[in-house]
Image (cartoon, rainbow, N blue to C red):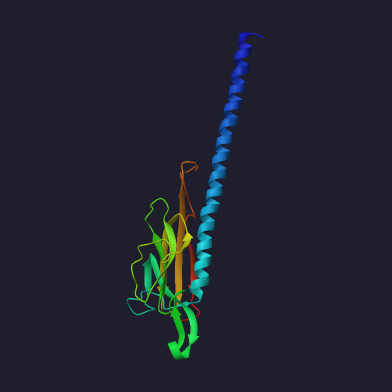
Amino acid sequence: MTITELIVAVAIFVAIGGALAVSLLMDQRAFVTSESFMHVQQQARRALDAMVKELRESGNIDSPTTSPNQDVTNTTRLNFQIARSYDDALCGGICWGNDATTGGWIHYLLDTTNATNVRLMRCQSGASDTVIADFGGGTCPTTLSNDVQTFQADYTNSTKTVTVRLENRLASSYLATGSVRTTPAPLRTQVKLRNP
């Protein structure tokens, strides 16, 4: 075997090895990207499913500091009450509140204390719309979704309809594009209240 043949053989093996390495890296990034896309998609869908189930049975949408059932547009916080019991003597019909308190409120809002992982939280407060500052423990025990990019809620009192938009985004240097969003546009759902 001459030196020329040896150089040609080495060059061919290097080219094949390089092509295999590039292919492996591209496949690995594609796998990580598709797995991340599924992750953010599932996060958003799980949150929307939980919200739809609860909102469908809710009433008294809006802020407890004003009269309930006011139109809400483009808000990043949604306040509402759920039916706690049916007691004509105590409430004159349906007793509205949150999980723990008649007259209390449930809030869907964003926890932006950690900018790299914005969370959509389900919080509770008493009869007045107190500012939710502590996102752990008692007042906000439930994280509906992590990696939230956009959360927006609209309520139309005339049709008793809540529209929720949710977009999740995951950023990582391992992703082919650097970040992955839920979809090109936020997931959107409309909920018609059963207890207006």
Query: Up-down: is 49 above or below 192?
Result: above
Query: Up-down: is 91 above or below 193?
Result: below
Residue 56, image x and y in percent?
51, 74
Residue 53, image x and y in percent?
53, 71
* Left or right of 49, for residue 62: left
Residue under the image location 61 percent in, 11 percent down: 4
Query: Up-down: is 54 above or below 173?
Result: below
Residue under the image location 37 percent in, 66 percent down: 75
Extreme-front residue of the structure: 137
* Left or right of 14, for residue 95: left
Residue under the image location 56 percent in, 39 percent down: 28
Task: Look at the image and tell me in which quarter the N terminus lies.
Answer: top right
Residue 86, image x and y in percent?
50, 85
Residue under the image location 45 percent in, 54 percent down: 147
Seen from the viewer's position, the closer of residues 25 and 106 is 106
Seen from the viewer's position, the closer of residues 104 and 173 is 104
State the image quarter where residue 108 is shown.
Answer: bottom left
Query: Up-down: is 68 above or below 23?
Result: below
Label count reads 0
